[in-house]
Amino acid sequence: MFLFVSLFFALQVRAAGPTADLYTEKIQPLFNHRCVACHSCLNAPCQLNLQNYEGFSRGANKFNVYNGTRIDAVTPTRLWIDAHTPAEWQQKGFYPVNTSPDPANNLFFQIIAAKTTEKIPPTKVVRESQSCPATAAEPKVAMPYALPGLQPDEVKTLEAWIRQGAPGPHAAALRAETEIPVEIKKQVREWEAFFNQKDLRHRIVSRYLYEHLYLAHLYFTHEAEGFFRLVRSRTPCENDVAEIATRRPNDNPGVEDFYYCFKKFPGTVVAKTHIPYELTPAKKRHLEDLFFKDPWKATRLPSYNYQEAENPFLVFKDLPVKARYEFLLEDAQYHISTFIKGPVCNGSAAVNSIQEQFFVFFLQPGSDLMARSPGFQDQAQNLLILPGVWGSDIKLDNTPAFLSKLIEHREQYRQLRARWKKELFPKGYALGDLWNGGGENPNAVLTVFRHDDNAVVLKGAVGDLPKTVFILDYPLFERLVYNLVVNFDVYGNVGHQLLTRIYMDLIRMEAEEIFLSFLPPEERLPLRTSWYQGLATRIKMDSLYPVVERDLPTAVPYSSVKNAKKEFVEKVLFTHFNSNVRGPIDPLNWKKLQAPESARLKTSLSSTENHLREIAAVPAEDKSPFARFFPDLSLLLVREKGGRFKAFSLIHNREHQNISWILAENLRMAPQEDSLTIREGIWGAYPNMFFTVKEEQMAAFTKQVLEMKSAKDASALIKEYGVPRTQERFWRVYDELNTHFQHTAPVEFGYLDLTRYEM
């Protein structure tokens, strides 16, 4: 494995040649392996982003992007988008960190050297750092903050670079970085031609696709030789792309003629923002069939007026709903990942409004009310207003009135939906009303795992029977996209962020409500009550979200009303879905869920997996409380004989009495219901702890876990098998996990973030 890691470094550090230079050979690879773990995306401390040289030359800024209490919206500061030169960034409040070619007077080098010379031990986690020195006179910090220091040879490399003036890549190296292989360039030009057709129908479809794909890391081959962003440009794509920087993708571009272009992603890929999306010739042919095979009439080019543009049901009303919904379904994991990662790196505003683990199913297009009934669409579209219609700067004194309007319209929509459903589905929904992926698409069932203020979306039913299930129809799916992604502005003020968060609550309850409608009527209210415990919460639910489908029947037959949730999920997974759609069974975690005997016979567990099964999906009751003491996401590295290893994610599912309130979440926990879900692979961008265990130690490791009864026992486990930030081997283990991630999932790979890593 050490040889494999060395090879990984060698691949990152390009061989010397005509385009070689110090920055390309040494500095950016060093940033990749030691700095972008914290200094990337908007949550980079002091906004110092080291994903490429442009981020370094931009410098730092003491302004905190993540401020949910700001009274006024602020100007965006997105790297690569909102400015491009150091002078432009300084006008936006950034200051240089490369202050001198003399290392003794260079701010950037001094905060790194301080770690080595002063031996400052790590204490707090990275995200607790708010210290941003702009001059040598300000209090000194030591980098990497709260993590082990760099090795002496790494410090010397940086020192030599600083003495040279901290130059960026040579022009030849930059050309090599941005050069697109001929075959990929051909595909890029074909896709740009598809997006930039001038007839009215194509212009509407291109706008719809752009608003859903602007966050994607687009790629054109299975090897993912570089990623691209879809942007709006003032200039034709064959020229230098002049990206139009707007707060939102549905904001007015400010020019009558613009072009949709593919722009090479310029920096190192990090896991917390990486949402890959493949574009192939077959995908292009499919989109042409999906949106243009059936006739439809475009009456006008949609407006960019914010009252219309922020409501997709109005702006795209000419575009057939069925085509829109099928587009979302076919890559559902991507679209739901945009809610989770979004434009903001992590989604604390939305993520604390979801449960720790749940399955997601979808109504099939033929059973979706809006796709099926133009009359329903006409009546519903004006009721489906979103907080984005009021912009990013919602004044506090207007917020209550706007919230009241959202709730009023939402209730009218729920009543409308119930009436139409009763008319079209008088016997209720049946299993056949769920999308089964056409028997081959694994996006038909997804699992969401929440890790504190971030989350991950997996294909398949992963983990044991969850507390809740989401079932999405088209209006819900589209509102998720527009509320949390397209319309959301992390630079917006408190009113905008508050209404966005509250509306996510409403969406969650609607998704749960559709799920409940598949269950027997007598089981719906008791199950919902179990999700929303507490007197104040029940009063809130009864007043703001009264049950509207209490007596509408279900067409799903049940053998036991009391076990209806379990029976329903098992029917969906093992009767309605085939193995192509459902994916492999989960023998590590399925304890309540029971796969058919025929499926279980086909699975076998390794010795390591058999040991891990002992601690997976075990409720953290008094006799087995060990799950309570694990952090949100641990990565377990199991060293096998011969130098190989496997990586497993240990996900702590923290259960709640309810998730109805924005604040004081820790007062509404249900720790006795906690459990661990264990899955091979790296499933999360923000690990909190690494464990390393030799294969022959697995029995001892699981035994010690099972015997954990206290925080003291947890500390003993970490002392024996954990990798605290104080250990010199910390960076070696981090490198091994990144290497393994890249080797086993090259398209999905991005460097792991360490801002949540515990002591």
Image (cartoon, rainbow, N blue to C red):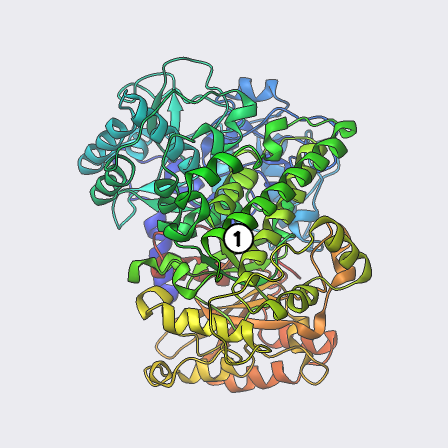
What percent of the width, then of the height, locates residue 730?
Answer: 55, 61
| Residue 482 located left or right of residue 603 | right
What amino acid is at disc 1? Gln
Per the image, the residue denoted by label 1 is 151
In terms of image quadrants, where is residue 15?
top left
Q: Nearer the viewer, residue 13 or 696?
A: 696
Q: Is residue 258 above or below residue 155?
A: above
In terms of image quadrants, where is residue 564?
bottom right
What quarter of the picture does the C terminus occupy?
bottom right
What percent of the width, then of the height, locates residue 430?
Answer: 44, 64
Instruction: Say which residue appears at 54% left-offset and 17% top-offset.
Output: 87
What percent of the width, then of the height, locates residue 747?
Answer: 34, 51
In terms of image quadrants, where is residue 49?
top right
Q: Can residue 335 be seen in this view?
A: yes
Q: Is residue 730 visible?
A: no
| Residue 11 located left or right of residue 465 | left
